[in-house]
Image (cartoon, rainbow, N blue to C red):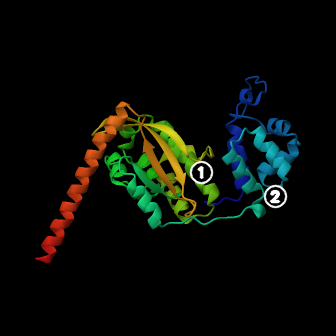
Amino acid sequence: MKRENDLGDFLRARRDAVTPAAAGLPDDGHRRVPGLRRDEVALLAGVSTDYYTRLEQGRERRPSEQALRAIAQALRLNEAAAEHLYRLGMPALTTETAAVAEVGSDLRLLMANVRDLPAFVVGPAQDVLAANPMAEALYSGFARFDNLLRMIFLDPFAREFYVDWDKAAEIAVGNLRAQSATFPGDRRIEAVLGSLSARSPAFASLWARYEIRPRTHEDKWFRHPGVGLLHLHFEALAATSAPGQHLSVYTAEPGSATEDALVLLRRLAERSEVSAYTEVTEQTGSTDR
């Protein structure tokens, strides 16, 4: 998915996302662009309009760090988006890290020991690499619990499960953008991106915004078919020994209705475990005979 002018694509998308009011500029109402004009970004950044135009058009290939920082501020970029801008503008100073695909035994053990809360490990392409029974029970309404992006955009159940589907979709795409910036050229990320871009117009539209927001923590509302409404707090814990992997854990407010609902979810998980064990035992027994 690499393009000829990634820096220009990024600058145009982020310029379109900043309104004059947000930048502290007057708006006469007669504008041909949805956000800021090139000359306005140049003014805010303290560079010439010609210089900024050449950056967007890909004719300026060696921007200074000072200019990029000024442009990041003018475009009101968050920390992750600003870092991505520096990667695009100064690739020679970027150290690339390869993502790790396999979940280590220590991380699996830690996840498994979180027995009363949903916990699972995801990779940079948002593949579910490992999950405990509580997480499997939480996402049991989906056809497959395999990739969070595929589930959100291609599984019809997602519209029922996520109380605010639009927000969940925006966050998921922003997180994939962040991961693709951290792991440029990652084949799995490119495969997921290509598939979703072709099959989901909603995903393609959100991807074109170039929002870069790594998902680290948030409050989420789910509508589970078995236990009802859930208000959970999400934390993503980076696995320093495995670049790109995060242990995702959901918790509930003590004494809340959701905490009670998690008890019911635990019972569903236990039933599923027993059913799975029985099925394996029966299959093994029939084979032995």
Residue 124 appears left or right of 85:
left
Which image quarter: residue 252? top left
Q: Mark on residue 177?
A: 1
Quarter of the picture containing the C terminus is: bottom left
Task: Find residue 165 and report its horizontal and vertical position in percent.
Answer: 45, 38
Where does label 2 land, which residue? 61
Tally of numbered discs: 2
| Residue 84 position (above or below residue 13) | below
| Nearer to the camera, 250 or 14 | 250
Task: Find residue 6 and report its horizontal and vertical position in percent.
Answer: 70, 55
**Residue found at the very far bottom of the displayed protein:** 288
Residue mark closest to the camera, 1 vs 2: 1
Type of amino acid at the residue the image marks with label 1: Arg
Whether residue 91 is visible to the viewer of this picture, yes or no, is yes
| Residue 25 position (above or below residue 271) | above
Identify the residue at image location x=48%, y=56%: 122
Which image quarter: residue 23? top right
Task: Find residue 179 and report its horizontal and vertical position in percent.
Answer: 59, 55
Type of amino acid at the residue the image marks with label 2: Arg
Identify the residue at image location x=59%, y=51%: 177
Identify the residue at image location x=30%, y=41%: 263
| Nearer to the camera, 266 or 83 | 266
Identify the residue at image location x=33%, y=40%: 262
Quarter of the picture containing the N terminus is: bottom right
| Nearer to the camera, 207 or 163 | 163
Which secondary structure lies at badge 2? loop
Q: Mark on residue 239?
A: none
Which secondary structure lies at badge 1? helix
